[in-house]
């Protein structure tokens, strides 16, 4: 089956929409996790790329080896050295074996989540001890260090050349577009789940705790909130989710290369989305990620028309454009397009009803909510 | 009256730092003379170390200047190094102007770029009440904008002058006649450390002996109090940023003589420059120079040592050395080398040493006594 072509202004619209949707979903996931860290908890994660790349590297390097073992393909004891011959035979094996493909995908995703969580745990050690600016520098440096490691350590992802990754969507490869539609559905579902999760966190007491810690650490601590533990958990969860996004991207692209994980692509662009849309507002971040991805992809499509008239590569204008957009937003609308809202509360009418029923209860039967033992427990839990 | 002298202890500490830097440079130059007169075979990486360490010292001084004035980590600082690199590159390739001649121009250009960034971006945002994180992000944005600007500029050079290697080029000293030779060694070997020494000594004199320098220090220490005394704080900040950009571009133009450059050369260096500044404490320009010397030297020497010990694969991770230094510094003593109370550490070590010595002595005695008991050596009570 082949997806029909629909061409407009020389652009294959369906192809364009599929690309846009996939990129948007992945960017949305990562920017939502950055929103959890930077927007809600005030952790300036300038090393975002490290966590995404870690997921990609873990999934990319392990899944191929596992597939080769399961399918009984000879790796000559040097997987990365013979990757050019191993991956095609793995892919032919996988294209007939949906179950194994899905297992591999799940394995890669779980592994990525684990690696991301461990890295997040490590990163949380300085994150709860250092001042904002020092932390930003430290995370930026760690991400750079991580990229040097990825680009230098041959056994992991083949150092600077990168390695190919088994195609776990090979079974959908009937026409080239169907595979991409499958991927799109998968990442869209993933992004939707992450959005629901982020929104639920934002509206929960935990979300209010996060903002309280961000805005006034001392006050939050005085109210008995363990700011260090909360920050650590947020970083771990956010890193695990972004690592999963990296893993899925790697499976989609079919290769992993240290060079693609730079601080421009997966740290700066993500921050642009966050700032444009509005930090600490999930809907805003979703909007910001869409605006960015849309602009980026459209510029990608139309820049060839200008190539003849301009004596330089149009790509460079992209950098200038997004950098100045970011600075303009920071200057004139620092909250982003959709600024942070105060915590969602119950509708006024519901509150009135609760108050009424409470007062009626107190009027008729003065039944305490807590038994005396519970009260006693609470008192011993929180002295003073 | 501008009689706001710092406390004597800090003053002496600064003097000591300047003296340390001057001593290191003196030792280096003395070493160069000895090397010339004795003529042993010195491995080229030692020459690299001298140049690299001096350049890092220069860059770290500038970065710390920007941090001192605005209290924002300037992630775009590396781009001003690239400004210097491209100034000397294009003037050499197009007009055949020697990089040493164009270095003052690079200094001025880098300074102008830096001031433009301060006035056009950081001050605007700071006056609108941006948070620290927003300001950091904006410096990152300026860095990204410079990626675009250098890209456009290099494409422009290619299309206008037909220079092909504008995106990535080898060290400019490869062009014959670019770098002079003194005592059989490349000139930069002398110029880089001497520049560092001259600039740090000059800064020391400026900041302690001139009215403007004292005003600058006052504006850094306590801007509102300085304003009360009638100091134009903004003017001193602008000057500090101009100097900082100038240092970056100057070291960039030296850098292009010694090492391959390109559009992203400066941005790739930024994390290492931060490592040097952080090691120096981000609060002292002389500390930064010292940090730069240490980071630059250890990057090459440690890698070389590691490669000899463990094999050549270590060299891939050369750029990782400064980052490891930075991470360790931030985690162990975030205020930098300058903040470490060496006297106290040495004192406590000495004290502990005494305790350890006493413990060991006691153990030895008890062992001796037991020995006596079992073997009856020494006999009796």
Image (tube, coloured by chain):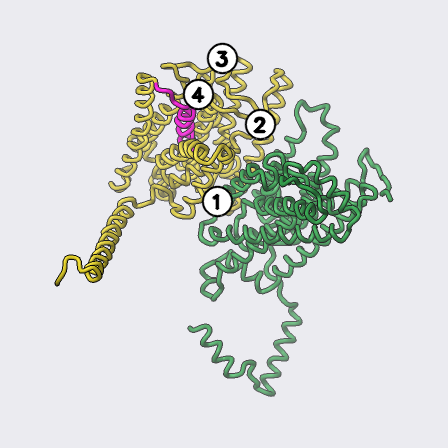
Chain colours: A green, B yellow
- Circle 2 is placed at which residue position? B150
Mark 3 crowdedness (10 Å alpha carbons): few <14, some 14-19, many ≥20: few
Magenta stretch bounds: B40-60
Chain letter behind tag 4: B
**Residue B51 as seen in the image, left or right of residue A183:** left
Q: Quadrant of the N terminus of chain B?
A: top left
Identify which residue, B97 or B164, lies in the foreground.
Answer: B164
Residue A97 lies, in percent from the top left, at 78, 50
- In the rendered image, residue B50 lying in the magenta stretch gets the answer yes
Upstream in sequence: badge 4 or badge 2: 4
- Structural distance between the alpha carbons of marks 1 and 2: 27 Å
Badge 4 vs badge 3, beta-carbon distance below 8 Å: no
The answer as to whether the residues below labels 2 and 3 share one chain is: yes
- Structural distance between the alpha carbons of marks 4 and 2: 20 Å
Closer mark to the observer between disc 2 and disc 3? 3
Q: Secondary structure at mark 4?
A: helix
- Circle 3 is placed at which residue position? B176
- Residue A138 is labelled as 1
- Identify the residue at horizontal 52%, vertical 20% (top origin): B89
Identify which residue, B203 or A30, lies in the foreground.
Answer: A30
**Residue A152 as seen in the image, left or right of residue A277:** left
Residue A120 vertical placement versus B276 (above, below)? below
Mark 2 crowdedness (10 Å alpha carbons): few <14, some 14-19, many ≥20: many
């Amino acid at each position: 089956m082949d997806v029909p072509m629909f061409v407009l202004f020389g652009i294959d619209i369906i192809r364009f929409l599929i690309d846009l949707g996939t990129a948007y979903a992945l960017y949305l996931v990562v920017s939502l996790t950055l929103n959890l860290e930077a927007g809600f908890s005030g952790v300036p994660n300038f090393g975002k790329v490290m966590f995404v790349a870690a997921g990609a590297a873990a999934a990319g390097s392990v899944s191929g080896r596992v597939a080769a073992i399961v399918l009984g393909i000879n790796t000559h004891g040097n997987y990365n050295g013979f990757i050019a011959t191993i991956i095609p035979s793995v892919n032919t094996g996988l294209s007939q074996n949906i179950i194994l493909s899905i297992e591999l995908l799940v394995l890669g995703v779980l592994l990525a989540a684990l690696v991301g969580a461990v890295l997040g745990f490590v990163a949380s050690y300085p994150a709860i001890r250092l001042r904002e600016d020092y932390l930003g520098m430290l995370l930026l440096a760690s991400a750079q260090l991580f990229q040097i490691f990825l680009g230098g350590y041959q056994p992991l992802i083949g150092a600077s050349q990168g390695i190919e990754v088994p195609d776990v969507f090979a079974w959908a490869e009937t026409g080239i577009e169907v595979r991409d539609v499958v991927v799109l559905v998968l990442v869209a579902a993933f992004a939707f789940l992450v959005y629901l999760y982020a929104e639920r966190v934002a509206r929960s007491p935990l979300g209010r705790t996060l903002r309280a810690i961000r805005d006034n650490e001392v006050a939050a601590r005085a109210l008995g909130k363990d700011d260090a533990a909360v920050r650590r958990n947020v970083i771990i969860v956010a890193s695990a989710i972004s690592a999963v996004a990296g893993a899925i991207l790697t499976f989609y692209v079919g290769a992993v290369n240290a060079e693609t994980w730079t601080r421009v692509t997966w740290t700066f662009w993500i921050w642009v989305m966050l700032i444009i849309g509005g930090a600490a507002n999930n809907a805003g971040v979703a909007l910001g990620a869409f605006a960015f991805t849309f602009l980026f992809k459209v510029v990608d499509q139309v820049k060839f028309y200008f190539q003849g008239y301009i004596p330089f590569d149009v790509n460079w204008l992209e950098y200038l454009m997004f950098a100045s957009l970011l600075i303009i937003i920071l200057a004139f609308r620092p909250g982003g397009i959709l600024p942070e809202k105060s915590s969602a509360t119950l509708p006024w009418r519901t509150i009135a009803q609760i108050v009424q029923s409470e007062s009626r209860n107190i009027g008729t039967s003065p039944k305490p909510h807590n038994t005396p033992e519970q009260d006693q427990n609470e008192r011993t839990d929180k002295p003073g | 009256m501008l009689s706001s002298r710092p406390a004597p202890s800090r003053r002496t500490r600064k003097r000591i730092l300047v003296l340390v830097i001057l001593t290191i440079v003196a030792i280096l130059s003395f070493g160069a003379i000895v090397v010339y007169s004795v003529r042993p075979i010195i491995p080229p990486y030692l020459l690299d170390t001298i140049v690299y360490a001096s350049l890092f010292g220069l860059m770290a001084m500038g970065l710390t200047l920007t941090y001192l004035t605005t209290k924002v980590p300037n992630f775009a600082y590396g781009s001003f190094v690239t400004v210097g690199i491209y100034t000397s590159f294009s003037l050499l390739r197009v007009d055949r102007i020697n990089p040493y001649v164009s270095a003052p121009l690079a200094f001025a250009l880098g300074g102008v770029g830096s001031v433009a960034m301060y006035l056009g971006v950081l001050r605007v945002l700071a006056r609108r009440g941006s948070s620290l994180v927003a300001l950091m992000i904006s410096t990152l944005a300026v860095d990204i904008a410079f990626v675009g600007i250098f890209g456009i500029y290099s494409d422009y050079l290619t299309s206008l002058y037909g220079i092909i290697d504008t995106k990535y080029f080898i060290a400019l000293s490869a062009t014959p006649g670019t770098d002079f030779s003194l005592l059989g060694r490349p000139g930069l070997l002398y110029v880089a450390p001497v520049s560092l020494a001259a600039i740090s000594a000059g800064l020391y004199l400026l900041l302690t002996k001139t009215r403007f320098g004292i005003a600058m220090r006052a504006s850094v220490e306590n801007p509102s109090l300085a304003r009360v005394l009638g100091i134009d704080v903004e003017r001193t900040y602008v000057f500090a940023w101009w100097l900082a950009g100038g240092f970056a571009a100057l070291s960039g133009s030296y850098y292009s003589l010694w090492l391959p450059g390109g559009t992203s050369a400066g941005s790739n260096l930024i994390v290492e420059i931060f490592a040097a500044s952080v090691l120096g404490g981000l609060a002292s320009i002389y500390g930064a120079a010292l940090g730069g010397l240490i980071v630059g030297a250890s990057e090459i020497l440690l890698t070389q040592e590691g490669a000899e010990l463990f094999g050549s694969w270590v060299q891939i991770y050369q750029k990782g050395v400064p980052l490891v230094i930075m991470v360790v510094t931030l985690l162990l003593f975030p205020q930098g080398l300058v903040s470490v109370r060496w006297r106290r550490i040495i004192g406590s070590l000495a004290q502990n040493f005494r305790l350890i010595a006493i413990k060991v002595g006691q153990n030895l005695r008890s062992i001796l006594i037991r020995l006596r008991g079992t073997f009856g050596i020494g006999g009796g009570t």
